[in-house]
Amino acid sequence: MVFIFYLQKNIQVMKQFQYLLFICQVLLFLLPLTGTAQVSEEGAVKKTIELFFEGFHQKDPQILTQTTDSLFTLNSVGNRGGKVVTTQTSGNAFVKAVLSRADSPTWNEKLLSFNIKIDGPLAHAWVGYEFWLGDTFSHCGVNSIHLMKQDNAWKIINITDSRRRADCR
């Protein structure tokens, strides 16, 4: 009788242990999936930025408009004569400038690093770069890029860049 009671109690404990083990396995399986969505969204943001710069290098208006919002703006922060100044260019003016530039020397903006943050439909990318005219180094800086997710696609809202010639490497 005592043996049967002991056996029944052990069976209950064993079932509870199996249930607990099952829950732990499910949690361990799901845990890596929590960061996967963020990582894939970061990849989509990076891909949009890289595609934009491909369009920039290729002078392709379709890629440039495909990767930007209709209200896209480009801002630059720089130093002129010892004074910090900003300039703003509309998306249309930017595309016209890209399309009308001479084929030589080629413009090459080398993207060096990405730091991407996302909150729902808003993303920000801090992208280090070097700018080259043909084989000649021109300047370096950072592109501060804001994007929004629209119709399941990331669109660039704004790029604000810094430009400097010193302390680039």
Image: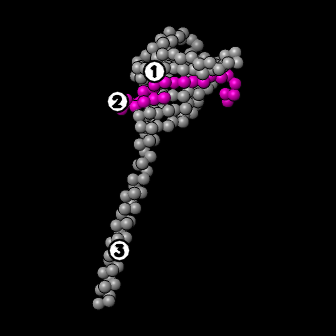
Q: How many marks?
A: 3
Instruction: Choose the circle earlier in sequence order: 2 or 1.
Output: 1
In magenta stretch: residue 150: yes
For the residues marked 2 and 1, what is the alpha-carbon distance in whole angstroms? 17 Å
Q: Nearer the viewer, residue 7 or 157?
A: 157
Mark 2 and mark 1 residues within 8 Å of each other at the beta carbon: no
Q: Residue at the location (45% across, 25% down)?
A: 157
Kindly state the secondary structure of the residue where label 1 is placed: strand
Mark 3 and mark 2 residues within 8 Å of each other at the beta carbon: no
Q: Residue at the location (67% across, 30% down)?
A: 169
The numbered dot on residue 72 is 1
Name the amino acid, label 2.
Asp
Q: Quadrant of the N terminus?
A: bottom left
Residue at the bottom extreme? 1
For the residues marked 3 and 2, what is the alpha-carbon distance in whole angstroms? 51 Å
Kindly state the secondary structure of the residue where label 2 is placed: loop
Return the x and y of residue 73 as percentages of the image width and height: 48, 20
Question: What residue does disc 2 label?
Answer: 151
Q: Nearer the viewer, mark 1 or mark 3?
A: 1
Q: Residue at the location (40% across, 31% down)?
A: 149
Name the amino acid, label 3.
Met
Is 153 rendered above or below residue 87?
below
Return the x and y of residue 166 as percentages of the image width and height: 70, 24
Image: magenta residue range = 146-169
The numbered dot on residue 14 is 3
Kindly state the secondary structure of the residue where label 3 is placed: helix
Is 147 rendered above or below residue 27?
above
Mark 1 and mark 3 residues within 8 Å of each other at the beta carbon: no
On screen, residue 19 versus residue 96, left or right, reads: left
Disc 2 crowd, CA 10 A, few/some/many (<14, 14-19, 20+): few
Identify the main secondary structure in magenta: strand
